[in-house]
Amino acid sequence: MNSDELKLAWKGIAPPTKTNEEIKLMLQENRHPVLKGIRKQLTIELLGWSAFLLCYYTMFDGATRPLSVNAILVTALVISIAHTLYGYALVKYPENGAALTASLEKHISRIKLYAIGSLISRMCYAAGLLLFFTYSIELTTAKYYSLAAIILVFLVQLAFLYRIWAKRLKRLSETLAGLS
């Protein structure tokens, strides 16, 4: 398909008509589908992590572990929560500039940093959990295998997360290249 056929096909598509009122409603924070999804994820994560933090000290014997191990676990959870909040702000307040391509370039660079932070926060979270739950355990051969399996699961998650971010960044870069 050459560019003339593509242009003709593009002109032939009738976009769905929206009134100004519908567009204003779409732009509101409570109606934005991406923000709504992020808010739902943030709420679930905050409730889950808060419940864990409220009961880890007694249910998971946090009282018997040193303060430093507890601090590492809490810090890892706070890093994850802060990272999710930063992601929400990143989507809620996009970069506005004079030129679309300049705004998109800046947004892509912010997304790249967010992706790196996502991987780092996931590693911190996994390391904090592993340290907390393995601190006072006497490791046997079977427990070493279990620990290796758990670490493998975390590494697979990191690999999937990396692939997801790589695909997203590639699509954004392709969009930017298409605009240039």
Image: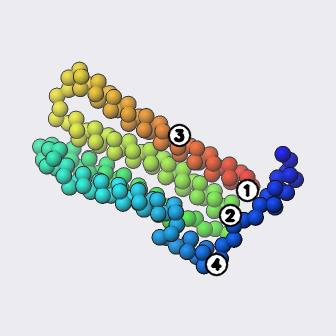
* Identity of the residue drawn at 35% across and 32% down: 151
Quadrant in which the N terminus is drawn: top right
Q: CA distance from mark 3 to mark 2?
A: 27 Å
SS at circle 4: helix
- The disc at residue 179 is 1
Q: x%, y% of residue 174?
A: 68, 49
Q: Are marks 4 and 2 in contact (CB under 8 Å)?
A: no
Q: Find the distance from the CA under tag 1 to the CA under tag 4.
A: 26 Å
Q: Nearer the viewer, mark 3 or mark 2?
A: 3
Mark 4–mark 3 Cα distance, whole angstroms, equals: 38 Å
Location of the C terminus by quadrant is bottom right
Task: Please name the residue shown 22% across and 38% down the image.
Answer: 133
Q: Which residue is mark 4?
A: 20
Q: Nearer the viewer, residue 58 or 41?
A: 41
The residue where tag 2 is placed is: 100
**Is residue 67 in view from this perspective?**
no
Quarter holding residue 27? bottom right
| Circle nearer the viewer, 4 or 3 | 4
Q: Of the two numbered discs 2 and 1 on the same chain, state the one appearing first in sequence.
A: 2
Is 147 positioned to the left or the right of 170 in the image? left
Q: Tag on residue 163? A: 3
Residue type pointed to by label 2: Leu
Left or right of 158, for residue 81: left
Q: Earlier in the sequence, mark 1 or mark 3?
A: 3
Q: Give how far across and how far down residue 70 sits, in percent.
A: 21, 47
Name the residue type under label 4: Asn
